Amino acid sequence: MSKVNVPKTNISQVKKSKLKVFWRENKSLIIFISLMMVFRSAVADWNDVPTGSMKPTIVEGDRILVNKMAYDIRFPFSHVSLFKIADPQRNDIIIFDSVVSDKRLVKRVIGVPGDVVSMHNNQLIINGEVVDYKELANKSSHKIMTESLISNSHRIRLAQQPSRLANFSSVKVPQNQYLVLGDNRDNSADSRVIGFVPRDEIVGRSSTVVMSLNYDNYYLPRSERFLIDL
């Protein structure tokens, strides 16, 4: 049998016709998905937390709300700032895309540009002032403390046997960079490992756990961690 040659112009017209039909039948869904993608990229999103580096504040399996307009209005799908709203402050929980570690991380801001920070046996000294601590719980493997930064306080977790991360000499935080630490002080790859965090790597700020899944119990939801403040 002889092969039938279909003109290329007809094939092109058929493809365009199918695309028009697809667009007409799915226009609302496509627009909705596009707007949601822009919203999640530039306005707000949630972020899974797979590790315990921020215990006891954030635990493995938490889904935290990320306010992407906390510091900047950014061009969607990029780190390009169109307008700066504010700068990160001490005690803020920030989400940033770390170039050094090649992953997205969640840590707490401890030092802002110009601060001089050091740590001795897990005790912070900021601009010559020793940070206040209070013990809340003492267990065989770790203890829970409150750490007061200026007028704000939060809980941290310290191992009974301090790690090599428990000490560092005085460092001055450069302009447009931040010193960040995990609340799980002896088990966190933070500025003590990756260095200062550049301002343009910061994605947003979080202050709420949206929901949480228990990795150790068949990923069942933890109802007690729904919509809690950090």
Image (cartoon, rainbow, N blue to C red):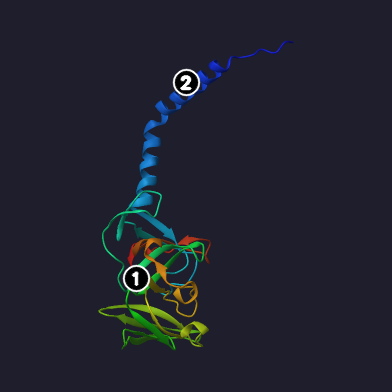
Alpha carbons under labels 2 and 1: distance apart: 56 Å
Q: Which residue is mark 1?
A: 175
Amino acid type of the residue that numbered disc 2 sits on in the rendered structure: Ser
> Residue 23's quadrant in the figure?
top left
Query: Residue 58 has which mark?
Result: none
Q: Position of residue 223 (x, y in %)?
A: 39, 63
Q: Quadrant of the C terminus?
A: bottom left
Decide which of 100, 23 is in the foreground and name it: 100
Marking on residue 17: 2
In the displayed structure, does residue 66 sit left or right of residue 215? left
Give the residue furthest to the top: 2
**Secondary element at tag 2:** helix
Residue toward you, 40 or 200:
200
Of tags 2 and 1, which is closer to the observer? 1
Q: Residue at x 40, y 79 (%)?
A: 156
Mark 2 is surrounded, within 10 Å at the Cα level, by few (under 14), some (14 to 19) or many (20 or more) other residues, namely few
Identify the residue at image location x=49%, y=86%: 162
- In primary-sequence order, the first of circles 2 and 1 is 2
Q: Is residue 86 left or right of residue 26?
A: left
Q: Amino acid at mark 1?
A: Gln
